[in-house]
Image (cartoon, coloured by chain):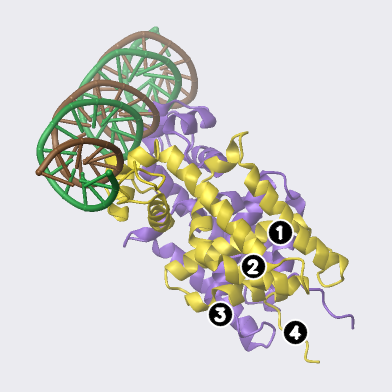
Chain colours: A purple, B yellow, C green, D brown
Amino acid sequence: MSHLGYGCLMAVDREHMLRSAAALLTRKSTATMDEVAKGAGISRATLHRHFAGREALVRALEELGIAECEAALDAARLDEGPASDAVRRFLREIQPSAGLLAFLYGENHLWEGEQQNEGWIRLDNRIGAVFLRGQRSGEFRIDLTPVWLTEALYGLIASGAWATLDGRVAARDFPTMIAELLLGGALRREEP
Amino acid sequence: MSHLGYGCLMAVDREHMLRSAAALLTRKSTATMDEVAKGAGISRATLHRHFAGREALVRALEELGIAECEAALDAARLDEGPASDAVRRFLREIQPSAGLLAFLYGENHLWEGEQQNEGWIRLDNRIGAVFLRGQRSGEFRIDLTPVWLTEALYGLIASGAWATLDGRVAARDFPTMIAELLLGGALRREEP
DNA sequence: CCCAAGTGAGACATTAATGTCTCATCAGAT
DNA sequence: ATCTGATGAGACATTAATGTCTCACTTGGG
């Protein structure tokens, strides 16, 4: 036994497999376990040793997505300053994970069962709280519910992720174009 | 032979099968052909007589979605009046088809191949044109591209469809909550 | 050097969904 | 009443992905 946790050899690490799988499944959500393995540069056998099956892999990706989302929320310091700035900070932080979130967003079966991962509920609450804070401070309008704003934010993140993957919009514009639309809307502001 | 086009018996009609399939697949995009048939109240054999396979069924649903989208665009009279009103009209018209569009939006394989249905391109152009018109008239801001606005509109329609399916938001609010967010954004307007 | 452990490759069984067929049944048209 | 043609039910083969093995190989540690 090595002093490391995973035995004497460390050729593949779980982190790399998950990243690689996320990147592939973002582009092709129906990719085979074999394709996922190929994409990660490992054999199907090894992939299966680490994840009991496709279901387990998707669940692991779900955990990863939740964790990255929470990390982004932490890094965004949601409670500081204007709520709109908090949203902008969050969007900058979440961009690297946007593809993964878009994939998970499309995995309907994650939302159907009774055993929905409670991590999403925590995230919903944290994001919803920002919108609520903005409403209470008079910064955000109150005729759009925090629930809908949260839902819309997820949807726009997914749209943004796919649009940048296709090259329809520039990746560098990702955080601002979502923030500008979500916060300011398409209508031109009156000149002061 | 009957004077109708489909022989002497008319127990099932293609329209009903498509509607039913759309409704089911919206809720569970991985539904089996057997489940789709059951949901339509017909046997798998009959379903398979009308649609050569799952692929053919999805393609037919794609055609239906495109057709409904075009019909909604027609009914919305996009060229008349302010562009923002045109968008609002479109959203009211598209609501009944929103679930179907959300399903199609998640069928990634429709967007990957080279043989992407050109109907989507037509739709993109028509919707993009409204945003462009709004920009030219000074109604819409110009720092958000029509391509992104179009993409965001699709995403918000899908988000709205799923949110109403889950009962997270009221179905009657669907058109306004999307329009208000897309056009006005979350930020509160300055008092006049 | 030898051992331990993880890996890649491939064979094989299993499973779920699909594609395909037959046949009895039923409803409408003539 | 009889004929026509579609339907439902089920049997069966096919396919694709998955789950599960074995085994030779490689690599790092002792």
Residue of label 3:
A145
Quick one: label 4, few (<14), some, or many (20+) residues within 10 Å? some
Residue positioned 33% across, 51% down in the render: B12
Image x and y of residue B99, in percent: 48, 61
Image x and y of residue A33, in percent: 42, 33
Quick one: label 3, few (<14), some, or many (20+) residues within 10 Å? some
Residue positioned 73% across, 52% down in the render: B125
For the residues marked 4 and 3, what is the alpha-carbon distance in whole angstroms?
16 Å
Above or below, comparing residue D12 to residue A87 in the picture: above
For the residues marked 1 and 4, what is the alpha-carbon distance in whole angstroms?
26 Å
For the residues marked 1 and 2, what is the alpha-carbon distance in whole angstroms?
10 Å
The amino acid sitting under disc 3 is: Thr
For the residues marked 2 and 3, what is the alpha-carbon distance in whole angstroms?
22 Å
Label 3 SS: loop
**Disc 1 with disc 2 on a shared chain:** yes
User: Which quadrant: the C terminus of chain B?
Assistant: bottom right
The dot on residue B127 is: 1
For the residues marked 2 and 4, what is the alpha-carbon distance in whole angstroms?
24 Å
The amino acid sitting under disc 2 is: Phe
Q: Is residue A52 left or right of residue A136?
A: left
Above or below, comparing residue B35 to residue A9 in the picture: below
Label 1 SS: helix
The dot on residue B90 is: 2
Front-most of residues B185 and C1: B185
Asked if labels 3 and 4 touch by Cβ distance under 8 angstroms, the answer is no
The amino acid sitting under disc 4 is: Arg
* Chain letter, disc 1 residue: B
Q: Nearer the viewer, mark 1 or mark 4?
A: 1
**Disc 4 with disc 3 on a shared chain:** no
Q: Nearer the viewer, mark 3 or mark 1?
A: 1
* Chain letter, disc 4 residue: B
Label 2 SS: helix
